[in-house]
Amino acid sequence: MTALVHNAALPARLTVVPRLHGLQKARRRIVSAVLTGSMIFCTAATATILLGIIGFVLYRGLPALSLDLLTGETSYLSDTIGILPNILNTLYLIIVTMLLATPVGVGAAIYLNEYARQGSFTRGIRFALETLAGIPSIICGLVGMLVFIHLFGLSQGILAGGLTLVIMVLPTIVLNTLESLQSVPNRYREGALALGGGKFHMVATVVLPSAMHGIATGCVLAVGRIVGESAALLYTAGFGLVLNDFFTALETSSAPLTVALYVYASERGAIDVAFAIGAVLMTITLVLNFAAHTAAHLLRKG
């Protein structure tokens, strides 16, 4: 009798199980569709915001651009406005900062990844770099002013601003170089050492060429931050709008493009000029990002 009851319950179970399975599949399809739609919406919203900002800045800035603005100099006596000194000051900052930050950052990353014993020390250094990368730039500018100008006696200019930017871009260069070095397979190192090469020879001829695309990307991203930085340079580079040569600008108040944008927008009320500078900065940023992706692709392919 028990066996008969048990056998009678089997068809009911066989009917319920497919229903539950079908409900679970339908539920998974609904959840997947909702998540896919949410991701598509977020992607579209992000792209729309980005394109809106770029389009608005270019729409307001491109009509105000002219050859006189790009190649001239600001003069209060003749009432002319030119951003050539600011463009040159931006290039000066890139040169000074990258000449100091690149060898230090790449060398530190090589030591941490290839020579230092992996443990709490290297983890602490990495944590410190990630923390330094998240410090607001205006705090770095305040520290740069107190240390490089008040303590070391430097004047406001490209040198003080460049030293401050070195502190800010070092984490970018070190962390990108570390990630690139860690992506090199260990068999490359083992093969080079097995062939009789020394540690330094192995790093110089095998590891660094294999990681060059990541190093180049980190350097280009650092240049992008230099171009777009303003808060720290308000304290250290100064507000000077006068055309200076490289060596004079090192110890003379020299405003890069970002500081000039602030000056024209907030102090002089020249909104059209500010948007023109914004268009120049936007173009430089887009070119740098394109150059970073192109360099990484070519170096990875090569």
Image: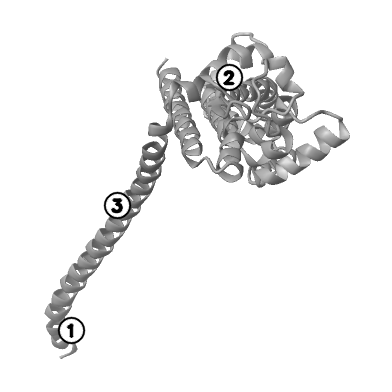
Residue 124: in sight, yes or no?
Answer: no
Q: Label 1 belongs to which residue?
A: 6
Q: CA distance from mark 3 to mark 2?
A: 42 Å
Label 2: few (<14), some or many (≥20) within 10 Å? some
Question: Horizontal and vertical percent for residue 272?
Answer: 46, 38
Q: CA distance from mark 1 to mark 3?
A: 51 Å
Q: Amino acid at mark 1?
A: His
Q: Nearer the viewer, mark 3 or mark 2?
A: 3
Corner quadrant of residue 260? top right
Question: Horizontal and vertical percent for residue 293?
Answer: 43, 27
Q: Amino acid at mark 2?
A: Arg
Establish if 223 lies above or below 15: above
Mark 3 vs 2, N-terminal side? 3
Q: Amino acid at mark 3?
A: Ile
The one of 149 and 107 positioned closer to us in this rendering:
149
**Helix, strand or loop at disc 2?**
helix
- Kindly identify which numbered label has been placed on residue 189: 2
